[in-house]
Amino acid sequence: MTPDQVTAVAGNSSWMLISASLVLLMTPALALFYGGMSGRRSVLNMMMMSFGAMAVVSIIYVLWGWSMSYATTSWAGITGSPFEFFGLKDQIVDEAGNYVEGASGYPNIIDIGFQLTFAVISTALISGALAGRVKFSTWLVFSGAWATFVYFPLAHMVWGGGLLSHAENSVSAWLFGVTDGEATIAPIDFAGGTVVHISAGTAALVLALVIGKRRGFPKSIGRPHNLPMVMTGAALLWFGWFGFNGGSAFAADGLAGLAWLNTTVATAAAMAGWMAVEMIRDKAATSLGAASGIVAGLVTITPAAGALTPLTSIILGLIGGILACLGVGLKFKFGYDDSLDVVGVHLVAGLWGTIGLAFFASEGGIFTDEVGPGFKLLAVQFAIAVAAMLVSGIGTFIIAIVLKAVMGWRVDDEVEYNGIDYTEHRESAYDLQGPDNMRSGLVSSATMKEEGSSGSSPVIPPRTEAKE
């Protein structure tokens, strides 16, 4: 390599290692975000679900996840062979002892680490729909099963040359033909609108329906126990998302810079949109709304971060924030208990970002380029969004039903009423009863009845107000 090439590889390697680290930070950030939204006697369980997913998915990604996602041997365009690169066989060093070069020119092992962090956060996102009512052991098994049978195949379909990619034998190629060996109208999912957010949001909806509602939902649900914790988690998610979207350029270049800026302005616009809805509807902008608007904006821009301009990113993000703010009320209208609004934020904003980018894409957008190709892109984006929902929905339902029969999902009613932390983890986030009582596991039922089952005053803010 020339000196300039060596410098470029070193710079790109550094950026991708930083990006992988930023994305890994997103899972503890999610634990803070979800933990703050939970009741104070369920906060540790909520956080442990994120950390537990990190443990399980990281291990299986090295064993078979990378191979299922990116193996050259594809099983009908649905998943890669889990055996080809099992345990990262032949993926780290070659026969001469040199590091295997990845598709972007730097060592392949860096890409493996980067993609591992995506699988972790995608699985952890689902946990927000299950707050305070499921067995931790069942969640751990579900994490591994869902990553294996839903996430890895979807990653292969979209990013590994499968059915939802721009490959010659893909859905988009079937719809609008092939040019030079690739789909004429290539689908756009820059950083995971389908693979991460639509799949996680759909899984959350399915699990909420299969597992059922919390006791007392919707009339007796408590307010988030720690809003500063929620805002801290949202801030760290925003920070980590620069690696999520910026790293998806796979180089330290102008595209990474564009993704960084688009991520910033779309997120700001979504937060503004969410707060505007609250101010019009509820006469006050809330900290919970601001934090949720941040996440909605990050979700919205994820599939489009490298395909829009900053101006069109603002428009996409603003609409995404408004739609997600309205979307969190769907659980009251339709009667499913998505505890921490995974469906309202990730599924709604993920669908809008994936489909809506067809209106604003710099190349091929309906409003920003030629109308004819733009409508074809819209059809392709709609197709991959629906396909991702079907894959995740069917896969999640099968896994959930099997685990319900074999292990059971729900904790006992008394455990749910008193808070799940001590029963599942033998510890409490806060010393509510004094050190002696906490060590012995004694809990005052009278105190519980006064404070509500979540351990906090059962006052429902406008965001989660039950609708008759």
Image (cartoon, rainbow, N blue to C red):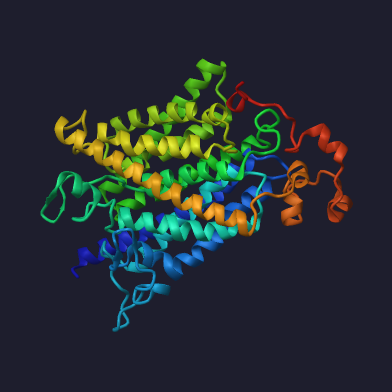
Of all residues, the one furthest to the left in this rendering is 180
Number of dots carrying numbers? 0
Judged left or right of residue 20, residue 378 is left
Residue 462 location (% of width, % of height): 60, 23
Q: Quadrant of the N terminus?
A: bottom left
Depth check: 207 or 34 in front? Answer: 207
- Residue 10, compared with residue 204, is above or below; it is below
Residue 323 sits in quarter: top left
Of all residues, the one furthest to the bottom in this rendering is 96
- Residue 380, compared with residue 151, is above or below; it is above
Residue ID at (72%, 56%) = 425
Residue 368 location (% of width, % of height): 20, 30
- Confirm whether residue 370 shows in the render: no
- Confirm whether residue 104 shows in the render: yes
Residue 439 sits in quarter: bottom right
Judged left or right of residue 288, residue 179 is left
Judged left or right of residue 42, residue 245 is left
Residue 409 location (% of width, % of height): 64, 51
Residue 91 location (% of width, % of height): 34, 73
Depth check: 150 or 63 in front? Answer: 150
Q: Quadrant of the C terminus?
A: top right
Depth check: 134 or 365 in front? Answer: 134
